[in-house]
Image (cartoon, rainbow, N blue to C red):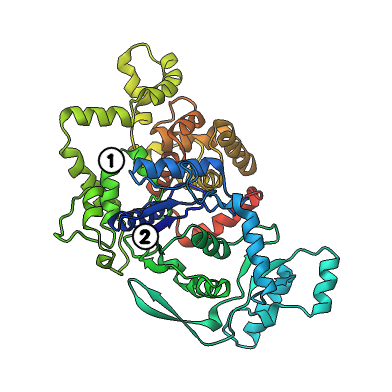
Amino acid sequence: MTVRTRVAPSPTGDPHVGTAYIALFNRCFARQHGGQFILRIEDTDQTRSSDASEQAILESLRWLGLDWDEGPDVGGPHAPYRQSERAGDYRRYAERLIADGHAFKCFRSAEELDQLRADLKERGENRALKPGDLELPADEQQRREDAGDPYVIRMRVPESGRCEIDDMLRGTVELDWSLVDAQILLKSDGMPTYHLANVVDDHLMEITHVIRGEEWLNSAPKHKLLYQYFGWDMPVLCHMPLLRNPDKSKLSKRKNPVSINFYRRMGYLPEAVVNYLGRMGWSMPDERERFTLEDMQAAFDIQRVSLGGPVFDVEKLSWLNGQWLHDLSDEQFLDQLRDWAFNRDYAMRVLPHVKQRVETFGEVVDKAGFCFSGMVAVEEADFQHPKHDAEAMKVWLQFYLWSCEARRDWQRDGLFADAKQLADALEIKIKDFLFPVFVAIAGTSASFSVVDSMELLGPDISRARLRHAIDVLGGVSKKQTKKLEKEWAAIVPAN
């Protein structure tokens, strides 16, 4: 048997360090066994998926050196490698399940589902919705189908009992069927959910080992059942521990930068990032802290993974990155520095904004230094304004950050439109609204256009600088966040 593993990210946002973490362990496992590593794009969420996000995933994984044997850009014998291009397959398999009695059409509306859940709660039944709750009588189902009502296809699941899941790290895990819902397999728009597409694609692409995050462990019974329904052999499962913030909570952008592009733009070496991700719950047999991707692959043993939630600590990553930097020769250091910020393509984008504002080369660093750095040093005093206090500006920055996070493209006109919309709703001048944004992004209000600056810097660094400014101004508590989220949603209903 040839070992075949895969990573299957969704192109719905920034490339996540969690994706790189799972990709790293899948690639090492495949390489250590002389097998193949596959990249598959799970773009069934058509409203949130984008070509730009897919491209960012490919570029960030390649930057880390985590290349693949088959994928949407390199092809392979099991193409296509985008789920959106395989929609016909999923419908055929969903209809096969209906024909075999393992799935059914569900015409229940959102209101009906809410009522069914409320009824269960009122009766004190702590269980998921089952086919018996959801399936309509044959005549009512036919009436709705004749009327053209939308429907989804759901799988049949047991009402009770236990499901045993074999996991490479955990051994045999028992899960309660009563908590497993009659999962939607095919949505009303004809696109599959993760559960159907994942099983079908893993089978057709001959995946032998599924190494994924432990958040998918509770879904494993559905997947095991689908393999049984189709009469297919199930891949070996391995659920990796989730990356954690230093406070042990699940890694999230509100507490830690999670985009691979952030670390790239901040000036971390790809070798150091891979080294650090490799230490997330795993260690070399000789326990050394520094190792290359090739070292990890040569010594890799999945059984050395610890189930304790590995803590992703940016300070430790920075220390490790420093160790890698210190070992570079002066020439290597200069080459890496030039490639990071002073490469020709990036410099040519910055210079048009600077050259009309300087009279000597000596002024360039002062005027544009923030474009060639990671974070900028700002203090609360930098936000002093003759008409507005720091608390108000903190709220503006938080609103603008949420608008930036919701933005799918990253161009100056859209960034300005978001700012103008918020300024108008808050009944303040756009110049005043942008004042704290200037300080957050450039470290000063005396800079060239802040939306031009943000387009140049990109979303990862721009949003990180906005978050940093909010923290400098005292931060936003959980209680205040809930209140502000409602206010922001009222201003920006489209988001």
Instruction: For mark 2, give the secondary structure.
Output: loop
How far across and down, in percent of the image, does residue 107 sit?
Answer: 75, 70
Q: Residue at x 63, y 68 (%)?
A: 184
Real-space Cα distance between discs 2 and 1?
A: 30 Å
Nearer to us: label 2 or label 1: 2
Q: Can residue 378 be seen?
A: no
- Left or right: residue 15 compared with residue 189: left
The correct choice, above or below, for 473 with respect to 449 in the image is below
Task: Tell me which numbered mark, 2 or 1, is placed earlier along the sequence.
Answer: 2
Q: Residue furthest front?
A: 1
Q: In the rendering, which numbered label is found on residue 3?
A: 2
- Left or right: residue 190 compared with residue 329: right
The correct choice, above or below, for 452 with respect to 233 in the image is above
Q: Can residue 57 be seen?
A: yes
The residue pinned by badge 1 equals 269
Circle 1 packing at 10 Å, graded few (<14), some (14-19), many (20+), is many
User: Considering the image in quadrants, where does the N terminus appear?
Assistant: bottom left
